[in-house]
Structures are given as C-alpha cells and as structure tokens.
Amino acid sequence: SVRALDSIKGPKELPILGNALDFLVPPDEILGVMISMCRKDSPMTRFWMTKFKPYVVLHSAPCVEVLLSGNKALTKSSDYDYLLPWLGRGLLISTGAKWFGRRKMLTPAFHFKILEDFVEVFNQKSAILVSKLAEKATGEAFDIFNMVTMCTLDTIMETTMGLSMDVQRQSEIPYVEAVHKISSIAQDRQKKLWQQWDWLFRLVGDGKEHDRCLKILHGVSLTTIRERRRLYAASSKSDNSAPEGTKERLPFLDLLLKYSAEGVDLSDEDIREEVDTFMFEGHDTTATAVNMTLYLLGSHPQVLAKVHEELDAVLGDDEFISSEHLTQLKYLERCVKEALRLYPSVPIIGRVSAQDLVIDGKLIPAGTNLMIFIYLLHRDPEQFPDPETFDPDRFLPEQIAKRHPYAYVPFSAGPRNCIGQKFALMEEKVILASVLRRFTIKSLHRPHELRMMGEIILRPKRGVMLKMWPRNN
Ligand code: HEM
C-alpha cells in the first residue's frame, strides 16, 4: 500500500536510504533542507527517511484542514517517541482514551477566570525582567534570549505549579540548558539512522549526555511536585479548602494533586509526566514567541513607533497591566500574531493516521507519518502575499476573513490544539507591553543571520542581539 505514495511528488531518493542522507546537516540547516525538499508545485510533498519510513509533508491550507479538522489523526507520529524518556505519555504525546481523559481533566485549569488571576503573576514576573533590562539599556549590544526565557520559566512555575522559584535572579539555570540540549538530541536522533536503536544510541550516540539532562529535568519536576504536595497537604489540613488564592478553580498542579488525593487513577508517575510536559511546553514556546516579536519590532522602527503610541494611549500612567488593557492592545496583538506567522514556536508537528486518508485526491495509507510544516504553510504566497515581509496588518479582521481558515495555525487546530493558547497570548502581551512601554530597541541581526534551528521548538542559533535604550531619555 506504500506504493500509493509514489503518486505524491517529492525529491529524488536513493535506493534503500531514501532521502535520509539529505538530513545529515547541522541543526541550523534542517529547516532550509526541508524547505528545499518541499515542492512549490504541489500542496504536499513525500520523502523517505529510508525506503521503510515514508513521510508526507503537508504545506498548504486545504491539506492541513483535512488532517486537523475532526478526529481522523489524533495520534502523534513516532518522532515524538524520542521525547518519551523525558515527557512520558503526558498530554503532548499520549493518545486514545488516556489523552482524551487527561485533556478533559486539565481543560478547567485554563479556564478564562483562572487566566485572569494569572495576569497579576504575568505583571510581577515581567517587572523583574524590566528591572534586569534597566541595567542593559545603555545602547550596548546584548543577547536578550535567555533573559526572556527565564522570565517565561519563572511565570509558568508560579502560575501552573504554584511555586515561586525566583529563577530570574539566578545567573544560570541548569534546567533551561538541559531543555535546550535534550530537545536538540531528540531532533538529532530523528535524522541519524544509527541512533534509532537505544543500545547503539547509548554506545556511540549522545546517550550519556541525554541521561545527564534527564536527571536534571526530572530532578526539578519531582522536587516541584514534592514541594507543592507538602503545601497542598498543609493548606487542606488547616482549613479544609484549596490552597490560598486558588478558590474552587484549581490551577494545574493542584488540580492533579486533588484528583490523586480523591483516588482518581493518577499515579505519581502520571503527575510527573504532566508536570514535565507543561513546564516545557509552557515556557519554551512563549520564550521564542516573545523573543522573535522583539527581534521583529527591533528591525521595524515604524511598527515599533506604532506599538509605543498604542501603549502610551492605552496604559497611560497605570502601573498594572490589566486584562482590560490587554483587550485594548489590538496593534500589539497583531504584531504578536504576525511574529508567530514568521517564526512559529512549533515549526513542525507530526501525526499518524489510524485509517486511510484521502488528501488532495491522493490516498495516504493508514500508518503513514504525516507532518504539518507550519513554518512553510505560513509562507504560502497565495495566502500571505510577499510572505517574508513583517506586516502586522495582515491580522486586521478584514484581512483574516480573506484567508483560508487553516492558513495560519501556530497553535495547531482542532481537538489536539494547544491547551495553553490563551495563556500564551496574554502572557506574551504583558511581557512585551511591560518591556516596550519603558524601552526602545534596535535589532542587530538581519533575518538570514538568525540561523533558525527547528529543534522541536524554533530557536535562533545566535540568540537575539539587541541594543536598548530607556524611552523619553
Ligand atoms: C506562543 C506559545 C505557544 C505556541 C506557539 C504553542 C503551540 C502549540 C502547538 C503547535 C501544539 C500542537 C503540538 C502537536 O500537535 O504536536 C501545542 C500543544 C500543546 N501546548 Fe502549546 N504552544 C504555546 C504555549 C503553550 C503554553 C503556555 C502551554 C501551557 C501552559 C502549552 C501547552 C501545550 C500542551 C500541553 C499541548 C498538547 C495538547 C494536546 O495534545 O492535547 N502551550 N502547542
């Protein structure tokens, strides 16, 4: 049945090895290789990671719609298996009844009422970032990437895990370094045939480094659970109610602890998987998104001027950025969305279909690995004319109405979309508004100098180099 895939266009392949050798390039060249493989004259492309493992890459809106709408392909592709030692079968990777039950269980933790309570934390954590940036705002070049990452990590730990770790005041965070390293190793394993087998991965691959990272990552998640369990038990004992400030709507980790205390089938390992999944997905994605928005604004002074104007008009002298302010920051929101178009934090997602599918008139047999190449989809010139140009007005309502509904999916779409989408957009806006109301910025890199790496999460190889100055100074 794999023969059916021969009717889909793709790059020339070698016997047995297929296209596997094409991927043996440094991490900052993978996206380029993928783009050059994908056919411009076809809405999807087929390639072979050896002749035993075909992939179909979808890069046009109507094809993406077939896959993401409905329940046809809710199972993740085997590429996610490389993340299993770290994330286990938490919400990102689980499938079937386990995924469905968890999704239902965790959705209330992202209820808009809870998100409104988080706005205060977004403000507090952004204020720490701003105070650190005040030292950098001298017109000297610096890399802002990790400073923003620490801010988003600090935020996710306090909002969803209920713990104040004060990571922004520390100079180095082994957790962040381990996240970057392990994602890079997982990505690397996908393309290196000899690393597919665990024993060989350990013998000649990055197995040792992988396990070192794993120890750091699980150390942090297990400590987090232990600490929150202690606080949860103490507060439940004292007044028989949820921990302080959480009312009846419990944030993420407390919700899991409550279910496990009530005897719902949720082992310590189950909780650990979810904590690891949300700590990772909840900070690394937003870090890239905020960083790339800053990069783009720092390269487009006229757009930045309009953002400044809007911030001054909406925020005035109000120190606290409220959810009402956020609703009014429409231009900033368009910038955030346009930045996620050009630099979607998750550039590629993978599925496998349990049943035969017909996409663009072609039969895709059950079991085929499917990729949605979000990065390329967002550059379709038919949907986004002059696609490399940063133009926030593409997200004016009348412009959105002209496009295919699946032309823009930075948070994926359908039942397995991003559970943290609203959280992310609110957090991004608070961080950006807090920073930009006080500072003006200039980016030092041109787009091709960023050398974007698609290591599960998109990352610029050389960070985001900026010059920054206080405003009105
Ligand atoms: C700008 C920020 C973000 C972007 C661009 C983003 C993007 C995505 C995408 C594309 C997916 C689908 C992944 C796939 O199909 O493999 C996803 C899933 C997910 N995201 Fe996000 N995300 C962001 C922020 C967040 C935040 C803040 C959280 C948590 C607080 C979060 C938690 C998750 C989880 C748990 C899933 C798996 C959902 C499921 O399969 O049911 N994400 N995200």
Image (spheres, rainbow, N blue to C red):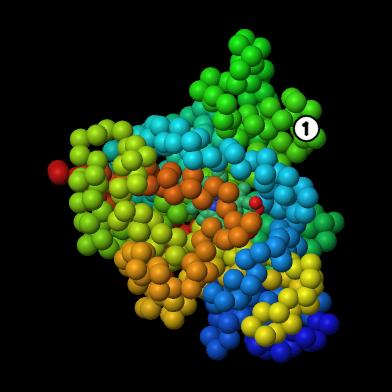
Q: Is residue 373 above or below residue 80?
A: below
Residue lying at 79% horizontally and 71% vertically, measured from the top left: 355
- Residue drawn at x 64%, y 31% is 255
Total numbered badges shown on the rendered structure:
1
Residue 217 visible? The answer is no
In the rendered image, residue 92, in percent from the top left (x then y), is placed at 67, 51
Residue, far top:
238
Quadrant housing residue 184? bottom right
User: Can residue 330 be seen by looking at this rendering?
Assistant: yes
Identify which residue is drawn at 44% across, 76% down.
383
Nearest to the observer: residue 311 or residue 78: 311
> From the Cβ of disc 1, is ligand 1 less than 8 Å away?
no
In the displayed orientation, state which residue is furthest to the left.
473
Residue 129, position as x, y percentages in the image: 37, 38
Q: Residue at x 75, y 26 (%)?
A: 262
Label 1 packing within 10 angstroms: few (<14), some (14-19), many (20+) = few
Instruction: Find disc 1 in the rendering and name its residue.
Output: 264
Amino acid found under the numbered disc labelled 1: Val
- Residue 324's spot in the image, x, y percent? 33, 40
Is residue 436 shown left or right of residue 54? Answer: left
In the rendered view of the protein, which quadrant contains the N terminus? bottom right
Report the quarter where the C terminus lies. top left
Comparing 431 with 452, the one in front is 431
Residue 271 lies, in percent from the top left, at 71, 36
Name the one closer to the observer, 222 or 209: 222
SS for dot 1 = loop
Classify 353 as above or below 33: above
